[in-house]
Amino acid sequence: MSVQERRERERAGRERLIVATARELAEQQGWDAVTTRRLAERIEYSQPVLYSHFRGKREIIGAVALEGATEMAAALRAASAAEEGPRARVTALARAYLDFAERNPAVYDAMFQLDGGLAFAHEDTPEPLKDAFAALLESLGEVAGEGVHPALFTEVFWAALHGQATLTRARRLPPGDTEGRVRLLVDRLAVL
């Protein structure tokens, strides 16, 4: 291994450590607790080392969001692939989405609530975000209905899931009715 390859590997390792530590701290104490000073203390590197990887908290949030999008896409695909038939696939997808949001609140915030400097729905949208949307589209596109653009249907269904996740977490919806909401969403929106 060349010196350059070793340096690149070490740099990538430090970057993963920074992102993992930020994510852990955010999940434990919220994003307000994530500062470059606290991250530097936790990973035992100086703040200038952090700044050599990320220009600031916004870029760290963006990195966590991209990691989360990759994980969400995998979870959605796994849930859908385990089911037979459109209704079961869409129901599993909805449950997996809501489960991901509930299990990873700080990551979910990084993906959809906080400014991570990422473009959504543009040509320059990062691949992990495009892939997370594609994971939704793969199952939802088949139940959009005749004359309905699959991507548009996916956006509406996604918005309903996001609203449910956000309102449930904010305790604006009763927590025990999640399954009923999923059934209603699937039954009323999806053409099965």
Image (cartoon, helix red, strand yellow):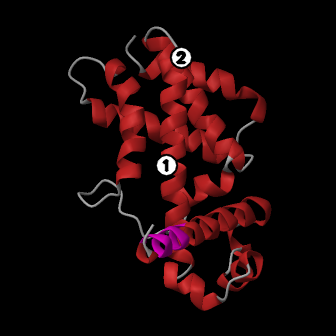
Q: Quadrant of residue 17?
A: bottom right
Q: Main secondary structure of the magenta part?
A: helix
Residue 127 x/y as whole percent? 35, 52
Residue 156 x/y as whole percent? 40, 37
Query: Is residue 47 a member of the stretch shown in magenta?
Result: no
Q: Which residues are magenta?
A: 5-12
- Which residue sits furthest left? 147
Residue 173 x/y as whole percent? 71, 39
Cα gap from disc 1 to disc 2, whole angstroms: 20 Å
Residue 39 in the image: above or below residue 150: below
Residue 188 in the image: above or below residue 168: above
Q: Report whether residue 112 is seen.
A: no
Residue occupying image coordinates x 46% and y 72%: 8
| Label 1: element kind | helix
- Asked whether the beta carbons under mark 1 and mark 2 sit within 8 Å of each other, the answer is no
Query: Is residue 7 a member of the stretch shown in magenta?
Result: yes
Q: Give the label on residue 82, or none.
A: 2
According to the picture, the residue beneath numbered tag 1 turns out to be 69
Q: Which amino acid lies under the numbered mark 1 shown in the image of this protein?
A: Ala
Quadrant location, the N terminus: bottom left
- Which residue sits furthest front? 1
Residue occupying image coordinates x 56% and y 20%: 184
